[in-house]
Image (cartoon, helix red, strand yellow):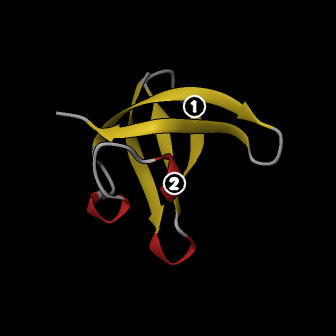
Amino acid sequence: MTGVIIRIVHGQSHGFIRTTEDREVFFHRSDVTGGSFNDLATDDPVTFRWTDDTVSGPRAIHVRKGH
């Protein structure tokens, strides 16, 4: 899937992505691959895989900064 980062909470090590389907999905710093969580910023395009986490609900995994 693809989307854009809409919010980063560096102090709590997580953020949120708005998908191309206009849904909001949570991700944790441990879900970032191929780069660093600290390199991500609001409005960055990203690719990711969607999963339904029993604790956090919809969650993005394998988050990568897009081009």
Label 1, residues with CA under 10 Å away: few <14, some 14-19, many ≥20: few
Q: Which amino acid does label 1 sit on?
A: Arg
Left or right: where does residue 42 sit relative to residue 59? left
Left or right: where does residue 7 sit relative to residue 4? right
Q: Which residue appears at 55% of the width and 37% of the height?
A: 60
Give the number of the disc on residue 38: none
Q: Which amino acid does label 2 sit on?
A: Ser
Q: Earlier in the sequence, mark 1 or mark 2?
A: 1
Horizontal and vertical percent for residue 20?
A: 43, 24
- Which residue in the protein does label 1 denote? 23
Q: Residue furthest bottom?
A: 11
Mark 1 residue element? loop
Q: Which residue appears at 33% of the width and 39% of the height?
A: 64
Q: Which residue appears at 30% of the width and 58% of the height?
A: 41
- Which residue in the protein does label 2 denote? 30
Label 2, residues with CA under 10 Å away: few <14, some 14-19, many ≥20: few
Give the alpha-carbon distance from disc 1 to disc 2, as whole Å: 21 Å
- The image quadrant where one finds the C terminus is top left
Q: Is residue 52 above or below residue 10?
A: above
Numbered label tally: 2
Horizontal and vertical percent for residue 34?
A: 29, 43
- The image quadrant where one finds the N terminus is top left
